[in-house]
Image (spheres, coloured by chain):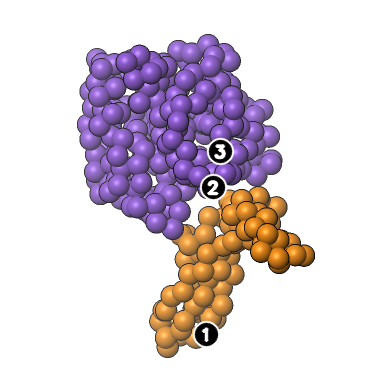
Amino acid sequence: MRFAARVEVMPKAGIADPEGQTIERSLPALGYDGVAAVRVGKLITLELEADDADAARARVEDMCRALLANPVIEDYRVSIA
Amino acid sequence: MSVRAAIVSFPGSNCEQDCERVLRGLGAEVVRVWHDATDLGGCDLVVLPGGFAHGDYLRPGAIARFSPVMQAVADHAASGGLVAGICNGFQVLCEAGLLPGALRRNAGLRFICRWVEVRVDNADTALTARAGPGQVLRLPINHFEGNYHVDASTLEAMRRRGRVTLRYVDNPNGSLDAIAGICNDAGNVFGLMPHPERACDPLLGSGDGALLFGSLLDAARGRVAV
């Protein structure tokens, strides 16, 4: 079966995210007050063949560990559809 | 017997000629190795030069790490051979797991290209032996992702074991502990963000880079002799 996967790659909690901080500082200037915890990450989408959704997830999680995310600085979350 | 240095080029490397010129000037024999090679031609020292290997796609070094030559670099390192990664080469070595930590986007979110001062944090390494402890070197930096990060316990172990080689005097990119260069636990794999190959002639503004290349060649000669 063919599955579509979405991989969200985010800076690890506790690691400064200068891009998110810059956006957070810019929003009040446009009148958007009360915004906190802005973080910027990456969204990777891909399609793959697998026997079932669990197998697809396992393969994509392997890809995350091998290439798509750097575990020193990034966390990832996989969704399969 | 002259030291044999291999300079690895990836698609997108752009500092290999400067490295070659400097190493030859210091008396080394230089072989250039393309990223699809599977052996390093029996070299004593491997240099991964700066640039934008594989376009820096995904993360700098993330794709380069899977170039066939990296297995040979890992084998060379595992057998105690000297490896030095400069700028993009440092990023590749971190992605490959041959050095701890990672290099993130500069804290100021700007590409930085300018001269900086770095202080020799440990002068008792194969990269820094020709410099004095605490000596300040003038070297250029040229990077977007030079913001060094490593987890707290690894940093503590690196500091305890003198694995931080160079620190910025005036931290330009937000690096943890102002780290500009490190080495692995075994002391034979080095990474640094500044470009010593661009600072090996007073005509270019500084000759300090030659201290680092000279140190590497001294160390390689020591290995050749035994």
Q: Position of residue B38 (x, y in %)?
A: 26, 46
Q: Which residue is mark 1?
A: A81
Q: Dividing the picture into quarters, in which one does residue B46 lie?
A: top left
Local secondary structure at mark 2: loop
Nearer-N-terminus badge (3/2): 2
Q: Dividing the picture into quarters, in which one does residue B113 lie?
A: top left
* Residue drawn 22% across the image and 31% down it: B31
Q: Which numbered dot is residue B109?
A: 2
Local secondary structure at mark 3: loop
- Quadrant location of the N terminus of chain B in the rendered image: top left
Q: Which residue is mark 3?
A: B173
In 3D space, how far apart are the residues under numbered discs 3 and 2 (Cα atoms)?
Answer: 9 Å
Compared to A66, does B35 lie above or below? above
Local secondary structure at mark 1: loop
Q: Chain of mark 1?
A: A
The colour one sees for chain A in the rendered image is orange
Q: Position of residue A58 (x, y in %)?
A: 52, 73
Q: Mark 2 and mark 3 in contact (Cβ < 8 Å)? A: no
The colour one sees for chain B in the rendered image is purple
